Structures are given as structure tokens and as C-alpha cells.
């Protein structure tokens, strides 16, 4: 027996030594992407994703296994997977991240073991592309102000009745998606509100979105009566109000302009199809068209007498904000037409556009 113990101890010591050597030689260890990514939004290339079939066991991991829930140490916001960003396996059944962009993204999700994609984004999901990989979509578009009770019930129904694992996404994978995950993590996996809030923080959910943080703070599991009243069929592609569609278009255009700025007002290497001045012109035109829409009209059935003044004031302010943003976009397009580009004028116009969009976002979208 003493000889056996000595042999076992020797093998264990050798195993630990080899493991530490492998970690020390890992490029991702030498360039600490896990730490750096908590401090910056830019992903670190070459770092392995904590995903894959081996990372998704058959049984649901208990809530206590979440690093965000059990320690005070910051955890990575997520990693790139194909064209998707902020992708992170929260537990055995739940992954979160940004919107799949191309067909190959759905193949990659399937390789991670995903069976159902839940979108809470305002953009219409590519249901056909998901089906080519045998994936099912559930679409429950939500706003930055939080989730309605009906949306909570619908998400809980999806998480509790469909077979996972689930990939939950919004547009960027940082705000609405993590809030939606809280419904499943608390309702199905038994997480506490404190654990779910910690997960939102680790995902990078902005503190200004009080309504999103209220989702775990105020969560109550739907009753049998609420579930019975929910739609029988979970929607693959929900009807999207005109205002949300407009915001999706603005977000996408803004991302392209931000990429142009990052490329020092040239063509972004990651988006060779982007023409800088053209993008600014299209953005300005789109803002002009938005000014012609009645996007902030009261919903059907609203008490016209009670909301008329508020609605009129909101619509007037919205159009004023649009005009300011539109003019800044035209100025940006003008600055980008020269060769070489007038970088100082382009920067000034971009910052004005950014300020205008942020102000409008806070007043009419948040």
C-alpha cells in the first residue's frame, strides 16, 4: 500500500506539472485576453471560445457554478464566434451573444450544441437560414425599457417547454439578451436575483438601463393560469412595430459609420464593401425619411384625450432631434467627399451626430 500511494502521488505531481507547463505555453495565457476583454470591448483574436460540445454537458449546471454568481472576480464579456460577438456560455443550457449575421453563424451555433435560438431583437430573424441547420427560432422583440409581463411569460414558456440548449441574442449581445436570459436562469435553473444581476453586469449591460436590471430584480415565475393564456404557438418571427424597425436600421448604419471612423475615415478592412461617403449619405437620407413617418403615434385603442398632448410633444421633439442628426450626417458626407478627407471636419460632424443620436435614444428609445 505505501508503494501504491507513492506511485499515485508521483503520477499526480507529474500531471500537475504538465498541465502548468501547457498553460504557461498557451498564447492566450501569455497574452491575457480573459482579463483584457473585461476592460475593453475589442475582442482578442486567437483566444479559444469557452464553448463547444464538451463545454455543454447533458445535465443542466446548477446556478452556483456560474463564475459571475459565485465570485467577485470579473469574467469575460464574451468572445467572437464567426460574425457574432460577445458570445458566452452562461450555463449548460444558456448561451448569449449578438445577432447571427451570415449563414455560417448558424452552422457554428449548431456545432456548439444549440437547438433553439431566441431573439429579443427588433430585427426580423433569418428563420430560413436557421432551419437549414435544423435550428428553431423563437422571436420575442423587447425594448431597452425592460420586459412586459406578457414577454416574460412568453420567454419562460419557451425556456421551460422547448429542448435546449438555447442561444439568446439581441443586436449586440450586451443588454436585452442577457436580461432575457435572466428569465430562464431564474425560472428554469433556479438562479437567485443576485446571481442573475451579476450575470448582467458581467455581460456589460449598461447601468443606465434600469428596466433591464428590473427583470431579475422583480422576476416572478409565471403561473399556470398565465401560461394557459399565452399564445399556443411560439412565434418564429413576430410583428415588429415601425419604430423598432427604424431603430434597427439606424443601429446598423451607425455601426458602419463607426467602422469608417475607426479606419481613419477610409474603407474598413473588415467591411470592404463599405463606401465611407455613401454610408453617410444613406444615413442622412434615412433620417430624412424617418421624419416623414408617424412613428410615435399612440397605439390603437389608446385614450386620445389623455395622450394627445404628450404624443404631440414627443413627436415634435423627435422630429427636432431627427433634423439635428440629419444635418450632422449631411455635414459628415460633405467632409468625406474630399481627397484627402478633411479629418477634422469629419470628426466634428461625427461627434455632433453621436451626441444627437444619444440624446434622441435616451428620450424616445430607452
Image (cartoon, grey):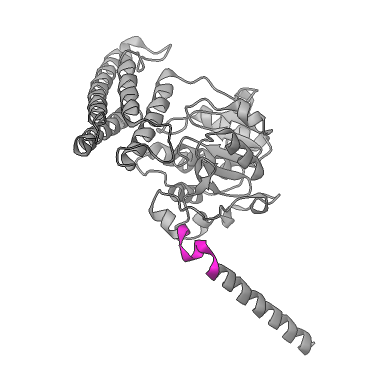
Quadrant for the C terminus, please: top left
Viewer-proximal residue among 29 and 247: 29
Residue at x 45%, y 19% (from the top left corner): 241
Q: Which quadrant holds residue 290?
A: top left
- Which secondary structure dominates the residues rendered in magenta? helix
Write the start and end of the magenta stretch as one range.
Answer: 24-34
Q: Position of residue 255 (x, y in %)?
A: 38, 35
Q: Could you tell whether 308 is left or right of 113 in the image? A: left
Q: Position of residue 227 (x, y in %)?
A: 62, 28
Q: Position of residue 2 (x, y in %)?
A: 77, 89
Residue at x 46%, y 50% (from the top left corner): 77
The correct choice, above or below, for 337 with respect to 210 in the image is: above
Quadrant for the N terminus, please: bottom right
User: Number of marks in the image?
Assistant: 0
Viewer-proximal residue among 345 and 185: 345
Q: Residue furthest bottom?
A: 2
Amino acid at each position: 500500500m505505501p508503494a501504491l500511494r507513492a506511485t499515485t502521488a508521483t503520477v499526480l505531481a507529474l500531471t500537475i506539472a504538465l498541465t502548468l507547463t501547457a498553460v504557461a505555453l498557451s498564447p492566450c495565457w501569455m497574452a491575457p485576453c480573459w482579463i483584457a476583454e473585461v476592460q475593453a470591448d475589442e475582442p482578442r483574436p486567437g483566444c479559444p471560445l469557452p464553448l463547444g460540445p464538451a463545454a455543454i454537458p447533458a445535465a443542466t449546471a446548477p446556478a452556483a457554478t456560474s463564475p459571475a454568481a459565485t465570485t467577485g472576480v470579473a469574467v469575460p464579456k464574451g468572445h467572437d464566434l464567426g460574425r457574432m460577438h460577445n458570445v458566452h456560455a452562461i450555463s449548460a443550457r444558456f448561451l448569449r451573444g449578438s445577432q447571427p449575421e451570415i449563414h455560417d453563424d448558424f452552422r457554428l451555433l449548431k456545432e456548439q450544441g444549440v437547438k433553439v435560438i431566441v431573439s429579443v431583437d427588433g430585427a426580423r430573424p433569418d428563420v430560413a437560414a436557421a432551419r437549414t441547420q435544423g435550428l428553431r427560432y423563437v422571436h420575442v422583440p423587447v425594448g431597452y425599457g425592460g420586459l412586459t409581463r406578457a414577454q416574460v411569460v412568453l420567454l419562460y414558456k419557451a425556456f421551460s417547454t422547448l429542448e435546449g440548449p438555447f442561444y439568446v441574442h439581441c443586436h449586440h449581445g450586451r443588454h436585452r439578451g442577457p436580461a432575457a436570459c435572466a428569465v430562464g436562469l431564474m425560472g428554469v435553473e433556479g438562479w437567485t436575483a443576485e446571481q442573475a444581476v451579476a450575470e448582467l453586469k458581467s455581460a456589460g449591460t449598461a447601468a443606465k438601463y434600469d428596466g433591464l436590471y428590473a427583470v431579475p430584480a422583480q422576476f416572478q415565475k409565471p403561473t399556470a393560469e398565465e401560461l394557459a393564456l399565452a399564445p399556443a404557438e411560439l412565434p418564429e418571427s413576430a410583428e415588429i412595430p415601425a419604430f423598432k424597425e427604424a431603430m434597427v436600421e439606424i443601429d446598423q448604419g451607425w455601426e458602419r459609420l463607426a467602422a469608417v471612423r475607426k479606419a481613419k475615415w477610409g474603407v474598413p478592412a473588415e467591411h470592404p464593401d463599405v463606401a465611407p461617403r455613401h454610408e453617410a449619405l444613406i444615413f442622412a437620407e434615412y433620417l430624412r425619411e424617418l421624419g416623414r413617418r408617424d412613428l410615435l403615434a399612440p397605439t390603437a385603442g389608446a385614450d386620445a384625450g389623455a395622450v394627445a398632448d404628450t404624443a404631440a410633444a414627443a413627436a415634435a421633439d423627435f422630429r427636432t432631434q431627427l433634423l439635428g442628426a440629419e444635418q450632422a450626417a449631411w455635414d459628415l458626407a460633405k467632409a468625406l467627399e474630399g481627397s484627402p478627407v478633411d479629418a477634422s471636419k469629419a470628426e466634428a460632424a461625427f461627434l455632433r451626430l453621436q451626441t444627437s443620436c444619444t440624446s434622441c435614444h435616451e428620450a424616445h428609445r430607452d
